[in-house]
Image: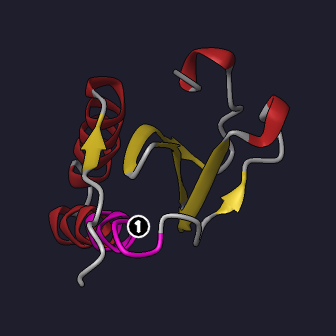
């Protein structure tokens, strides 16, 4: 019997953050922006099969959130049942705020 995979769900703020970062990079190098977005999408797609592959977010109280790193970005997510909810995309130097942990 096949194991049911959860869904990968992007929150609107996370999509907006990825779009803003991509647009900023594309001002200088469209190809680099495209490659970065593809790398992020590839990394998050793997979360459907291995949702615990990311590390616990060090700043998150209770360690309910996890992250995968796609340099120079942090992709923050949490598990919701079998689903993976991507809640934030941050540049590595950006501080993680409580508003990112929705």
- Determine which residue is flagged by label 1: 47
Look at the picture and state if 21 lies above or below 32. Answer: above
Q: Secondary structure at mark 1?
A: loop
Residue 13, position as x, y percentages in the image? 34, 24
Magenta-drawn segment? 40-50
Predominant SS of the magenta segment: helix
Left or right: residue 28 compared with residue 62: left
| Left or right side of 13 for 12 | left
Identity of the residue drawn at 35% across and 43% down: 21
Q: Is residue 25 above or below residue 89?
A: below
Q: Residue 23's x, y, as percent?
A: 22, 43
Nearest the camera: 6 or 102? 6
Q: Quadrant of the N terminus?
A: bottom left
Residue in the picture at 28% in, 66% down = 5
32 in the magenta segment: no
Where does residue 50 sit, x and y in percent of width and height?
46, 74
Identify the residue at horizontal 25%, vertical 52% (top origin).
Answer: 7
Residue occupying the far bottom of the picture: 1
Circle 1: is it few (<14), some (14-19), or many (20+) Cα within 10 Å? many
Residue at image position (73%, 48%) is 57
- 49 in the magenta segment: yes
Q: Is residue 101 above or below residue 15?
A: above
Relative side of 33 to 52, left or right: left
Relative image position of residue 67 (x, y in whole percent): 60, 55
């Amino acid at each position: 019997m096949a194991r049911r995979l959860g869904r990968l769900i992007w929150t609107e703020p996370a999509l907006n953050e990825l779009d803003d970062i991509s647009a900023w990079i594309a001002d200088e190098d469209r190809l680099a922006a495209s490659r970065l977005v593809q790398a992020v999408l590839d990394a998050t797609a793997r979360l459907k099969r291995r949702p615990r592959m990311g590390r616990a977010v060090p700043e998150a109280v209770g360690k309910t959130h996890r992250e995968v790193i796609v340099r120079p970005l942090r992709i923050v997510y949490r598990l919701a049942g079998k689903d993976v909810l991507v809640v934030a995309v941050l540049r590595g130097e950006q501080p993680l705020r409580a508003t990112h942990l929705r």
